[in-house]
Image: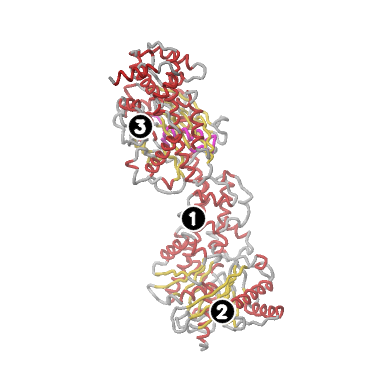
Amino acid sequence: MLAVHLVSFFFSKLQEDPTKKVDRFLYAMRLHDDQLKDISARFQAEIKKGLSSESNAAATVKMLPTHVRSTPDGKEKGQFLALDLGGSKFKVLQVKVREGMGIRRGGVELEEKTYPIPKELLVGRGTELFDHVSKSLKDFMHVRNISLEKKHPLAFTFSFPCDHSSLDQGLLLNWSKNYRVRGLQGKDVVQTLRDSIDRSGDMNIEVLAMVNDTVATMMTCGFDDNFCEVGLIIGTGTNACYMEALCHIDLVEGDEGRMCVNTEWGAFGDDGALNEFITEFDRDVDAASNNPGKQIFEKMISGMYLGELVRLVVLKMAKLGLLFDGRVSDALRTKGKITTAHVAAMEQYKDGLKNTKDILMELDLSPSSDDCVAVQHVSTIVSFRSSNLVAAGLAAILSRIKQNRNLRTLRITVGVDGTVYKTHPQYPKRLHKVVRRLLPECHVRFVLSDSGSSKGAALVTAVAQRLASQRKKVDEALSPLRLNQEQLQLVKARMRAGLETGLKTKGSSAIKMLPSFVYRTPDGTERGKYLALDLGGTNFRALLVNFKKGLQQNSRVYHKIYAIPLEIMQGTGEELFDHIAQCVSDFLDYMGMKKARLPAGFTFSFPCEQTALDTGTLVSWTKGYKATDCEGHDIVNMLREAIKRRNVSQNTEFDLDIVALVNDTVGTMMSCAYEDPRCEIGLIAGTGTNVCYMEDLKNIKKTEQKIGKMCINTEWGGLGDDGSLDEIITPYDHEVNQNSINPGKQRFEKLTSGMYLGEVVRQVLLDLTREGLLFRGHVTEALKTPGIFETKYLSQIESDRLALLQVRAILQQLGLDSNCDDSIIVKEVCGVVSRRAAQLCGAGMAALVDKIRENRGLDHLNITVGVDGALYKLHPHFSQVLQETARVLAPQCHVTFLLSEEGSGKGAALISAVARQRHGQK
């Protein structure tokens, strides 16, 4: 009875607009934007699920890594053979890639031949299928007069889902597109191809890469458009791929760079995620397919199923009397009688209705004009839903890319291939329009791939060869900066020899080994208030340190920081010390102690020849200072004279009781020794680098006293000034040295300290760019600017938490427009330069601790090193590499590294306190 009422209802509507009748019948297929956004969000969730190692096994969208790590940049070249297997036929091709021309200008030439695949092979054994492929390859080479003896690189486009462990290895997950070949699922497809080539004999073929047709499409379009990072297939099947940040792909080791991910999005919905959008016609198509319950998204979209969906809708409407006066022909009942090609023909702009009528008449139907309009509209709704679903999936991918890169807007190109996209007259426009409506903040360009899957595999191989060639050249450029154990042992030996020579020589030596006249480290009984002054970089610090009476290792520190302008650093000595006197006066005012005459320690972080604790003659400026009339003069006296000048000019009266002139390294050692009595070494690894240590007086030829110990300020930055490090000096170091303010001086410091590492990196980047290995070979003015690459950028770029996107942002701040591959290389360069610096410091430290151990006649030494300096403190890996190098090169020494809290300033106050104790002035 219900059926009679339904038929009566539908017959009453026969006279209305036929398109409205169809709209009502297929309302579930007419998706509005809110539904598309919902589908897009669900697909984004599936992407995350597929990328995660924890959820991938249960994910329907497998997100397969392809091991394709870069898109073309136009520098690819070479000649390749290619196979393209994915449908009822397959192609063999010879592809020639010319550098820098692009596809449109003839940069990629191909000759091809199509070979049929007998139907029995589609359901036969895998070895039989691939033997047929190999015989066809051999035939192609014979026809094209291609030498069988010469070795030929081969690229393989294989349009079925595979689990890749490398570019030239992939296990078949499952067949699709009517392939049901036995014995290959779970096997390595590339090895199967190699085995069949070997069986055919006489061919010298090297299979370099296997890629999915979607990936190949992206690569083909990427050869002409550097913004192409997405591939899309809408043909017999459907799929998408895109370039994903490697740090988000759990299934592949490493987190540097990008990799193309083959989404295999046809399986979206296999877990029921699309159930509320699936119609009865979709369920019928699925039930009648070779793989029920699988590839649900593909069955709503792709060319293999669109014609069948239209047929089932038309059949149902006819059975309900809504078409053809209720007449149903046998042909209309037959699966496959309406194809996707018919759907495209029915939607032709001018001849669509005529084509519709012809198609329906071929099905033994007698359609009226309204029937033709209605059936054409059915085709439109089915194909429009297909393009809408593709747009939703594509919007999810593009949104993810934009979010990953933290961009407000995204400019990107999508490479597209497939018969539906190419032959359907309305499909591309509909797709483009909906994508742009769903993502108005993205500037999306669609590029049709020309022989995409065929050329693309060759381009993947060409890119792999380019990257391998680039990798080799980058390795060659960085090789001199990578130190082996033999070289580190050499540095250790040269440092040891330099330390010994400096101790024994009263004249000049590369390592100065300057006596500090500090005879012991603190014992914790120091007390009282002391003033400390600290000059060593771009800032000057004034400190008041109060060591509490009777409380060991208890102190309070008050300090204030003052800038030293560049014009003062590089002006006259009088201007420099007048500025320091002004800062001291201000600090005493600030502390309300202008009239107090406290004992003061002056940390002066430059090499000085000392004849007593409170006198010191500047040997040479370092760290960018070059104030005139200072070298060869007593620094303490220059400060006292500046205070006198200030008292006269300002009509004020303040004085300092300068008890000690201290190097910052010595101050650091003393500060840490206050915390750890085993601390007998001080290390600075910052703007400059230096080491001091407690030496037996009997070994110091420069002093008369022979009993006890004295701290020696090594000034080890001078190692190599005599040519002793020439074996490890690179052309980059030579450039840095020549362009410095003190050529030929402080060679070790120029290899290891924060003042120079950024400049070493810049020289390397400049060289790589000139060689065409970076920044597309474009040498910018920024890159040519000395000092622009500050050492702080090394610490930032090498941070483990920093994504390559942030590396690119740093480089853009410096005026360096980089792509992902550039960022990887820049990060590697920074790592190599900073690692070498840390290793060299570690080798130097190994020389020192072994010297102390041997001097004391010990089999094993336990000792603490007090450390200060921004490079050691802030660089993410420097300290670890330094410590590990010292451990390996001095295995009989257990060295503890203790960070200095208040650093050299507090150390200067401690030295003043120790000196007062030594002279009995409690």
Q: Is residue 447 above or below residue 890?
A: above
What residue sits right under mark 1 in the picture? 798
Residue 207 among those drawn in magenta: yes
Q: Residue furthest left?
A: 1
* Quadrant assignment, res 315: top left
Disc 2 to disc 3: CB gap under 8 Å: no
Q: List the residue tagged with mark 2.
A: 531
The alpha-carbon separation of the residues under discs 1 and 3 comes to 43 Å
The stretch of residues the image draws in magenta is: 202-229
User: Is residue 606 visible from the viewing direction of this image?
Assistant: no
Kindly tell me whether residue 445 is visible in this rendering: yes
Label of residue 295 in the image: 3
Residue 687: x %, y % from top left: 56, 65
Query: Which of disc 3 and disc 1 is earlier in sequence?
Result: 3
| Residue 807 within the magenta-colored segment of the rendering | no
Which class describes the residues within 10 Å of circle 1: few (<14), some (14-19), or many (20+)? many
Instruction: Say which amino acid is labelled 2.
Output: Leu
Q: Nearer the viewer, residue 273 or 818?
A: 273
**How dense is the environment of label 2, judged by Cα within 10 Å: few (below 14), some, or many (20 and up)?**
many
**Residue type indicated by callout 1:** Glu
x and y percentages locating residue 1 in the rendered image: 27, 19
Image location of residue 204, percent across then percent down:
41, 32
* Mark 2 vs 1, N-terminal side: 2
Q: Secondary structure at mark 2?
A: strand
Q: Describe the element under mark 1 as helix, strand or loop.
A: loop
Which of label 2 and label 3 is nearer to you?
3
Residue 777 in the image: state x and y as whole percent: 58, 44
In this rendering, the label closer to the viewer, 1 or 3: 3
Most foreground residue, 149 or 601: 601
